[in-house]
Image: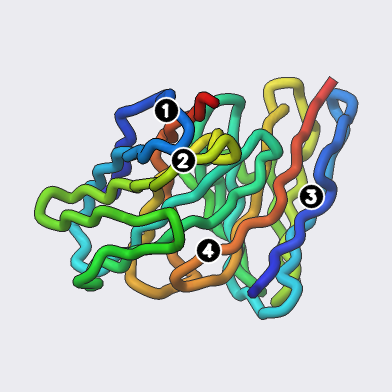
Amino acid sequence: AQKITQTQPGMFVQEKEAVTLDCTYDTSDQSYGLFWYKQPSSGEMIFLIYQGSYDEQNATEGRYSLNFQKARKSANLVISASQLGDSAMYFCAMREGLSSSASKIIFGSGTRLSIRP
Amino acid sequence: GAVVSQHPSRVICKSGTSVKIECRSLDFQATTMFWYRQFPKQSLMLMATSNEGSKATYEQGVEKDKFLINHASLTLSTLTVTSAHPEDSSFYICRAGGNTEAFFGQGTRLTVV
């Protein structure tokens, strides 16, 4: 069965510093997709970044990058130059299959990131 | 990009009544939609998979008679919380479409009093 683990319930980071949010996963599938979402207090789920299991390069989207280490089954999110607006809940998620809108996505328990001015 | 619209964003209902939540895909067809529930300070838990033209598939522990799902068209899925009780108070959010980016509705915060 699939499983996503986020071991950091909360983190505090000084503004402008980089931060790494940890995520490990477990699956027996060879093809899967990994996501990171940001959830502010409003509740909306904001897509940040995606990594396919066969992607050789780490995904990057602006200040976000995903440190994908397949052998270790980890998919850590790195946020460079953190901003006050980055304070939110962050979820790591995984989907079976590389590209199927009909596949389930399961979520980790989340990490609450707080940026200090 | 694709947009998923969820309505209402917030609802308060009396215990024992039913509440319907709508999830619409605005610019694409979605044969499959997903419904999640999120309790305060917890993660999103998948409740059920909504399939257009057929019965929904419920996750273990989710009561199908309490959480009625209807997916009558390729752009609309509804979740009805029947005979709501205070313990059903939660944040409900739908998801549809997308390959490298799954699209979520805005979510519905349900409070049962």
Cα gap from disc 3 to disc 2, whole angstroms: 36 Å
Q: Is residue A75 left or right of residue A117?
A: left
Q: Is residue B45 above or below residue A34?
A: above
Instruction: Look at mark 2 in the image and give the residue it sits on.
Output: A82
Q: Position of residue B22 (x, y in %)?
A: 79, 56
Q: Report if the CB atoms under discs 1 and 2 are less than 8 Å apart.
A: yes
* Chain identity of mark 2: A
* Chain identity of mark 4: B
Q: Nearer the viewer, mark 4 or mark 1?
A: 1
User: Hey, which quadrant is residue B112 in on the image?
Assistant: top right
* Chain identity of mark 1: A
Asked if residue B90 shows in the view, the reply is yes
Query: Few, some or many C-alpha atoms within 10 Å of disc 2 (few <14, some 14-19, many ≥20)?
Result: many
Badge number at residue B21: 3
Could you confirm whether marks 4 and 1 are on the same chain? Answer: no
Q: Is residue B97 above or below residue B91?
A: below
Residue in the image at 76% along x and 61% along y:
B5
Using the image as rendered, state which of residue B110 and residue A112 is in the foreground: A112
Cα gap from disc 2 to disc 4, whole angstroms: 25 Å
Residue in the image at 77% along x and 47% along y:
B80
Badge number at residue B111: none
Could you confirm whether marks 1 and 2 are on the same chain? Answer: yes
Could you confirm whether marks 3 and 2 are on the same chain? Answer: no
Cα gap from disc 4 to disc 1, whole angstroms: 28 Å
Cα gap from disc 3 to disc 4, whole angstroms: 19 Å
In the rendered image, the quadrant that contains the C terminus of chain A is top right
Instruction: Look at mark 4 in the image and give the residue it sits on.
Output: B102
Asked if residue B73 shows in the view, the reply is no
Instruction: Look at mark 1 in the image and give the residue it sits on.
Output: A13
Q: Position of residue B62 (x, y in %)?
A: 55, 39
Q: Earlier in the sequence, mark 1 or mark 2?
A: 1
Cα gap from disc 3 to disc 1, whole angstroms: 37 Å
